[in-house]
Image (cartoon, rainbow, N blue to C red):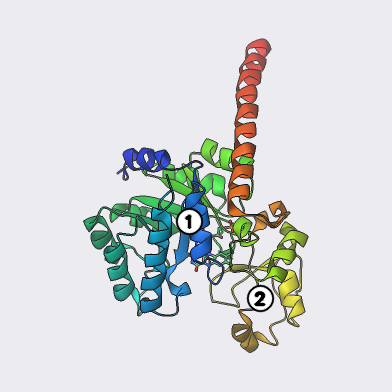
Amino acid sequence: MERYGDPQVTARLKKQLKLPLVVAPMFLVSGQDLVVASSSSGVIGSIPALNARTTEILDQWIGKIVARLREKTAAAPFAVNLIVHASNARLDADLDLMVKHRVPVVISSVGSPDRVIEKIHGYGGLVLSDAATVRHARRAASVGVDGLVLLSAGAGGNTGWLNPLSFVAEVRDFFDGPIALAGGLSSGRQIAAAEMMGADFVLMGTTFIATLESEADQSYREMLIESGADDVVTTDKLSGIPANILRASLERSGFTVSGDHKGFSVKREAELMKLWRDIWSAGHGVGGVTRVAGVSDEVERLMRERATALQGNAALGKAYPMNIASSR
Ligand SMILES: Cc1cc2nc3c(=O)[nH]c(=O)nc-3n(C[C@H](O)[C@H](O)[C@H](O)COP(=O)(O)O)c2cc1C
């Protein structure tokens, strides 16, 4: 089987980070402050290009992010998320901005990254491609992306559906570059678990919606704190592709959610699109969101939890071989 990807890229990226974490790009939630706070806390901060209404506004935002991060010592790289689907009329203009500002990492989503790779590599930037299927991951790897974001079941926003254990295992079989696992992760223990599964990094969205630096409404933050995994419903009625949504935000907007996890009354389906600002997304990891805190405090929590979990893993490693030996 053909292999793709370069482990040196993973090693270089890890050296620039305090924790193997990307704070996910989130529509209407990520702004300059979230990017700057994340990268200054030693993890990769990111923003979707389309959060800026125009390419000109994006130009100003990236200029400010670069200037603010330049003042920090040892800031981690930041990323911009480009929708590479043919329907994105701004792609070429936004791509030129990546080149202008030498954006260190570009996360491509919804489509094939072919169109962006050459330009980003031209100035030494990295391209990480989102993938929700093994086929898409292999295709992105074969056209030369540097890394993959594996969107698994339980993710906030447009979710994947594959089991993360199976997804990482199958992709690791042909990809030696950086793999970031996304979907339902909200603790340092889960970061350690993702690393044990073969991922190099994790990407977390929902956890960082509730931070002080996000652009989210205070009531969105409160709803996250009150919700658990059972309060998330999966529907394709919002965007045509499956997305994870907080049940309470649908009910508050007058929709009746039927069944445990899926579906809600379609009577007012036409109105859904108008309500996207009031209908809020979260991944299955929402139960791990228990407070409103600054990004640096959340990063520290995750670092502590990961370190504790890794110590626990070392103990597990000692326990089981002894059991095997004694049972022989
Ligand atoms: C409110 C919200 C908005 C999102 N918007 C985008 C987006 O614009 N582009 C994108 O590639 N992913 C988007 N995502 C998905 C995230 O980048 C990421 O894959 C996801 O949050 C990971 O799952 P988690 O929320 O369970 O941690 C969004 C997620 C959320 C929760």
Q: Is residue 327 above or below residue 188?
A: above
Q: In which quadrant will I find the N terminus?
A: top left
Outermost residue to the front: 71
| Residue at mark 1 | 45
Residue in view at x 59 percent, y 77 percent: 238
Residue in view at x 61 percent, y 79 percent: 276
In which image quadrant can residue 317 be found? top right
Residue in view at x 65 percent, y 60 percent: 210
Q: Amino acid at mark 2?
A: Ile
The answer to whether any part of residue 256 appears in the image is no
Q: Amino acid at mark 1?
A: Gly
- Tell me, for residue 279, which label it has, or none: 2
Q: Is residue 150 left or right of residue 96?
A: right
Image quarter where ligand 1 lies: bottom right
Callout 2: helix, strand or loop? loop
Mark 1 Cβ and ligand 1 under 8 Å apart: no
Q: Is residue 298 above or below residue 83?
A: above
The answer to whether any part of residue 165 appears in the image is yes
Callout 1: helix, strand or loop? strand
Relative image position of residue 19 (x, y in whole percent) = 51, 42
Relative image position of residue 221 (x, y in whole percent) = 69, 64
Q: Is residue 94 above or below residue 253?
A: above
Relative image position of residue 169 (x, y in whole percent) = 48, 42
